[in-house]
Amino acid sequence: MIVTPQHVRFDSLPLDSGASLAQVDVAYQTYGVLNRSRSNGILLLHALTGDAHVAGISQETGKPGWWDNSVGPGKAFDTEKYFIVCANVLGGCRGTTGPASINPATGAHYAMSFPVITICDMVRLQKKLVDHLGIERLLAVAGGSMGGMQALEWAVAYPEAVAAVIPIATTSRHSAQQIAFNEVGRQAIMADPDWNQGDYYGGKPPARGLSVARMVGHITYMSDESMREKFGRRLRDKERYGFDFSVDFEVESYLRYRGAQFVERFDANSYLYITKALDYFDLANGRGSLAEALGQTAARFLVISFTSDWLYPTYQSLEIVKALRSRNRDVAYCELTSNYGHDAFLVDIGEQSEILRGFLASTFKEAA
Amino acid sequence: MIVTPQHVRFDSLPLDSGASLAQVDVAYQTYGVLNRSRSNGILLLHALTGDAHVAGISQETGKPGWWDNSVGPGKAFDTEKYFIVCANVLGGCRGTTGPASINPATGAHYAMSFPVITICDMVRLQKKLVDHLGIERLLAVAGGSMGGMQALEWAVAYPEAVAAVIPIATTSRHSAQQIAFNEVGRQAIMADPDWNQGDYYGGKPPARGLSVARMVGHITYMSDESMREKFGRRLRDKERYGFDFSVDFEVESYLRYRGAQFVERFDANSYLYITKALDYFDLANGRGSLAEALGQTAARFLVISFTSDWLYPTYQSLEIVKALRSRNRDVAYCELTSNYGHDAFLVDIGEQSEILRGFLASTFKEAA
């Protein structure tokens, strides 16, 4: 299935910072058909570097979507039963307005004049899109990592607009360690002279800094075990240590390759803005406590974490589950066994698919 | 106690790479008095960014040594009983020959013409120092992290020259994840244009790259728990999010400060060479297996790991312990409970001190 994004423009978007954006474009993709009662809509929410292209083969890149193993006919998010929507986030660089976009007020790229955004801002824009699509109440919102944060925010901000919420491999607030890893990535980008205070559009992007940021990210997405299984101490194209600073180990080669590849498809300023939104995220912020925030929700919850995910460890999912239970909310929780670390929700999807399938089916039946 | 390093020069040092260094200086410090039977000598081995200044107040910097809480009169390494030696490693930048040193053959800094070195090379040079000091057999060699790797190499390479070996928070070989974190640090340094292929002496050092490398390191030295306890999500000098890219969180401020501070005292090329030595380290390399390597040893072992150390996790210490036991070697093992992560061996020293004290005393009694 060859897919291309659709686009919609909204006149304005107020932001948590107090600023507002005058004109906001959203790139999104849909799969399946919205039923007549408009009750089968599911919003999928991507992680830090994802985009609207969740499934199918992109006409632009020829590559499959980031959750192609989970979205399609007969898959966990079954496009024969559900109407699936996925949009590029606010601040992104894949069709939705972000720092690389042209500021209509100046005719120039926003760059670092783009306002700082939050997860709530991203969700506020998604709500506009869902309204635009004529869906009053979503069957579900689901996402992993940053997508899970957005799912939580949906549940709290728009309790009547969503029947089920599926936060996967995520947290209700970024911890000091999570902030620290993001800060290293930002510092790596801003240390690159090509970053030039964010004004590099039309010139040379800060490829070296962004590549280092991505390398740090990649390590945190894998687990010690999965790296050992994938690379061990295997040497790259040589039989002994090179005794120089070229690539010795396969893991070095992999990281350099993934770093270089990332630079081709992602905007460094978007990386700054989106990681900042992650770090600001605290569902309890301005809502008293996590339990008070989640006490405002009306949806069913399915919370999923993975044993080897050390970036968003199980204890953070349990905090969400405990807060929901303390307010007598309907919550199912699964810790799935996987060696794949944080990436598990994207790659190790066997059990996850079965659980998602059952949870969505029972929600759909109940809602019908 | 104000201390200054001593220096000694050796004529040559053969290296694992096949290269050799024509002239090698070693900076070292000693504490306490070598007894008449020369049986109370202990060699302490520093970690990646440490130096010879293990205890006392440095005349140069006015600061205490990196293990000042563990070395001194009445402390774990009791300078009233033992003669303590600590030397800056080969490849370092604190008095021992490294890439910042002048190559006697050219009169210029070695920079990247410095040969790639290994943990074995570092230990080979330490052996020369210990011979120079007239110590035929050390009572103990001890160190954490990279120091622990050197201690293991001492036990295998010079079995008759050491009565007891104390590897702390370390591994017998660098894993893919450990290599990956080091590679990110190296890439950050080499991405900095000021690195200039290593030729920056007399000019501007690659401060931004080295600072990013140090920030990555710092995160891995702490634990999720210790970061949460130390910083949480506390804001720095403000009451709400700044909605800009200046420092918001205390953890960001801490990392930036530690990164900037590190640049003042450490050479970027040394960081490249020493991390490469860490990544090359595999005690079993050329020795069949870990059990065969450790089967060559004659020392008593005390292996220590820490519950929250995720950089050098307990399972890596257990691999060492199992290999030693499989060859009927004398090994005691302690996993100590601490929230301090990898830094625990430097800062959370209560229990560690008691264990070290007892182990050293019984070794000394046996050896006497």
Image (cartoon, coloured by chain):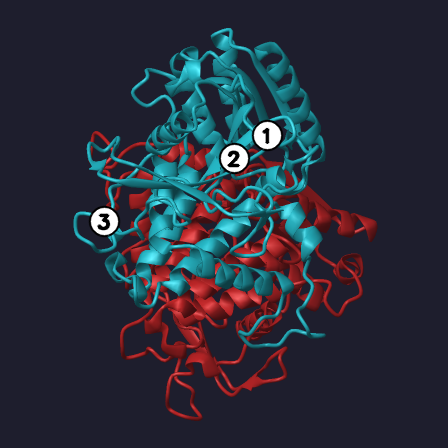
Chain colours: A red, B cyan
Q: Earlier in the sequence, mark 2 or mark 1?
A: 1
Instruction: Count up the numbered dots.
Output: 3
Q: Which mark is residue B312?
A: 2
Q: Which mark is residue B103?
A: 3
Q: Secondary structure at mark 1?
A: strand
Please state the chain letter of the residue tagged with numbered disc 1 in the rendered image: B
* Image coordinates for residue A126, horizontal then vertical, percent: 55, 70
Q: Secondary structure at mark 2?
A: loop
Q: Quadrant of residue B35?
A: top right
Q: Report the residue at 41% width, 58% height from top.
A: B210
- Tell me the distance, in whole angstroms, between the alpha carbons under discs 2 and 1: 8 Å
- Categorize mark 1 by other alpha carbons within 10 Å: few (<14), some (14-19), many (20+): many
Q: Does residue B83 appear to the left or right of A272 in the view shown?
A: right
**Which residue is outermost to the front?**
B36
Residue A252 vertical position relative to residue A203 in the rendered view, above or below: above
- Categorize mark 2 by other alpha carbons within 10 Å: few (<14), some (14-19), many (20+): many
Depth check, front residue: A280 or B108? B108
Q: Amino acid at mark 1?
A: Ser
- Categorize mark 3 by other alpha carbons within 10 Å: few (<14), some (14-19), many (20+): many
Labelled pair 2, 1 in contact (Cβ < 8 Å): yes
Q: Does residue B187 appear to the left or right of B53 in the view shown?
A: left
Q: Earlier in the sequence, mark 3 or mark 1?
A: 3
| Residue under numbered circle 1 | B305
